[in-house]
Image (cartoon, grey):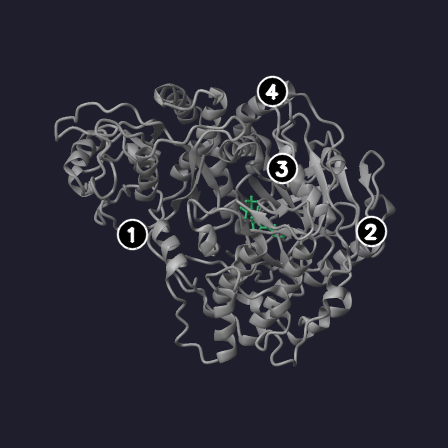
Amino acid sequence: MDQPQLDQTPIIIEDDIPSESIGDSGNNLTMMDANPSSVFTDTLSSFSSGHSSLFGGNNNANNNLSTFSSSTSASSRRGSMQAAKVEVRETLDACLTENKDGYTQLKQYILKGVIGQGAFGKVHFAVDENTGVGYAVKEFSKSKLRKKDKANLFKLGPRGRGRGRRGPDAPSPTPESSPLDLIRGEIAILKKLHHPNIVKLYEVLDLAQDDSMYMVFEWCEKGVLMPVSLREKYEPVFSDAECRDVFQQMILGIEYLHEHDIIHRDIKPDNLLRSHDGTVKIVDFGVSEMFDKKGDDLTKKSAGSPAFMAPELCRHDHGEVSGRATDIWSMGVTLHCLRYGLLPYVSESILEMQRVIREEELNLSDEKDERFATLMHQLLEKDPLKRITIDQLRVDPWVTNDGQVPLISKEENIINAVTEVTEEELRGAFQKIGGLATVFKAITKFKRGIKTSSNRSATSSPVLDSQKSAVSESERMQDADEDVTPTSTLVQSITATAEITSTPVAEPPMLVNEALETAVEHVALDDEKPAAPEEPTAASDPESSTPVVAEENVIHAAVEAAQETPKEEKEDEGPAGYQVCDMESGLCYWVPAAKKVKSTPSPPPAEPVVTPAVVVESVAPAEEETKPVSTASTAPSSSNETAADTHENSTGLSHHSTLSSPSQGNGSTSRSSSPTRSLTPGPRLVGKLSRERFAMFEKTS
Ligand SMILES: Nc1ncnc2c1ncn2[C@@H]1O[C@H](COP(=O)(O)OP(=O)(O)OP(=O)(O)O)[C@@H](O)[C@H]1O
């Protein structure tokens, strides 16, 4: 993904850093052996030397290769391995204002434009008005985090983990918990990390009366290392020396994390950014985990992006696996991408991809460098116990180029100790916590006000043309939230259909609905996005101008869920369900497994045999509403679906998404016994989602 070019507004770079920029009287400071001035000076110089792109430089992934000059190789960076420890400021009750130039300002940070879109909000490029230093300010929607967290909680029970939790023994959120808890774990981990190859967190700001909170990170000017696509080869690929340089830096960053019992769990080129001098920065600790006990890295969680997931995680029923080994697998997949511009394992469907990852041998027949081929096989070793370790990587012949480019010593690399995150620190990540009522009010206000605010920012913020695509994409995503009609329709549908779902009685209905709402919201968001070119599938006609793609994987997940009666819920484990993972975003949704209902006589052959447990109606995108779909063009794959499609498409008005289906009648709903995927005539899964995007990969009970 290319970094959009940034604002060309001149940015003042001051040589003298005002002391106010280091401390802020109204803030809570968490002292971390602080040496902030050196960090700020460092950042300032990095900004100073790298800011040319702000004045018209071509700041994209392709020309990023030029950053691998000899002067910025890993060896030249060795002298600076001791990343300065810097205090992380925590600002509560912050507010957004508009400055005299029309920019939105958050405390001293002038938000200059959107440089990225994360799952929970935009990423802004911001400049400190006092110092001229550039930062990446990541925005989080508390309401989205809450929904996601609830879904995780129900998927994994009280041991559920997410951004807010850091390990197996972390406390569960209670109804009284602040939404800030949702991010506390990530903040607490990031505060502990002081390494040149790990993105630095400087400040956390909360808008007490609003839905947003912000994390201020060091700005990685060169953006993501490489955008990875499922099918398209990325070019130009990295040279041997460039690959080695990046990989060495990854080793150092991961070694530092692992030595301090932190597992990243989402290593991929998208989460490797580069600063102005090509230093690789590991980012996104949203699914990372910090283990309490030294050496303990066993996790049951399947997190991360499916294409980068280790084979031991590509099973629905995997037990505890070593988090360190899974990170190393992901490093291997990343290295493969860097070297060849392609993923090592690709398939049209995610379930199939998981099978391929588990079972198929790595094909490196074209690789000329035997050392590299050997290394890749050791990184992508299916057996985690036999997989290469970080210690072995340090002395690997390809990594060190036969000893010519050694890494700095382990001792030197991990010198900045990470101390354990205490409960007190977790609680103290923010000092003031608004009451739940305030939060709910803020969410409501946010939902009401978002349109106004996004309109305002669109008109009053001087955003460059080069940024507009990023902004409009962000706004499109926000618009999905603010569209009252579809949202309320979705919520109503969920509420109504949750009643017909045989969900476990112990499950608090409100939370079930919210978990579903989370899933649905993302489906809805996707429906709002512009259509990506779709591969023809059994349920879509390449001729059709309206992409109508049966979401086969989700249906499989639903059907498989329907086939089994969930185990009895244990009180402390939450309800049974399935995790459905969106491959592109890495987000996982929880789909409750519905209980089997008693057998009833089979319906007549022409009638459907599955009743969806959760049927969520989404409104078709506007352009489709005005464009009725020809029934002939949808090429349904079964007679049952023919009926459904004919009925549905002839209206040209609405689409439906089926998230999970309990079996009914004779229960003959497996793929093999019912290859045509019997569905009710009305609801069926359609949308603009690529069929390979979703996979069910974890069952919980
Ligand atoms: N520190 C940074 N410096 C420069 N650009 C950044 C920085 N952090 C993020 N970005 C840009 O913003 C984009 C989105 O980042 P972000 O980490 O929010 O996305 P994400 O992977 O969806 O994460 P999450 O799931 O945590 O929301 C990145 O791809 C990158 O282009």
Q: Report which residue position mark 2 lands on.
A: 36
Q: Report which residue position mark 4 lands on.
A: 441
277 vs 644, nearest the viewer: 644
Rounded to the nearest angstrom, the CA distance separating label 4 from label 2 is 37 Å
Which of marks 1 and 3 precedes in the sequence? 3
314 vs 525, nearest the viewer: 314
SS for callout 1 = loop
Is residue 98 visible in the rendered structure shown here? no
Question: Looking at the rendering, in which quadrant would you find the C terminus?
Answer: top left
Q: Please name which of the two marks, 4 or 3, marks the residue nearer to the observer.
A: 3
Amino acid type at image mark 4: Lys
Which of marks 3 and 4 precedes in the sequence? 3
Rounded to the nearest angstrom, the CA distance separating label 1 from label 2 is 52 Å
Disc 3 and disc 1 in contact, CB within 8 angstroms? no
Q: Report which residue position mark 1 lands on.
A: 535
Q: Which mark is residue 164?
A: 3
Which residue occupies 35% across, 31% down?
565
Rounded to the nearest angstrom, the CA distance separating label 4 from label 1 is 43 Å
Q: Is residue 513 left or right of residue 11?
A: left
Which of marks 2 and 3 precedes in the sequence? 2
SS for callout 2 = helix
Q: Position of residue 393 (x, y in %)?
A: 60, 69
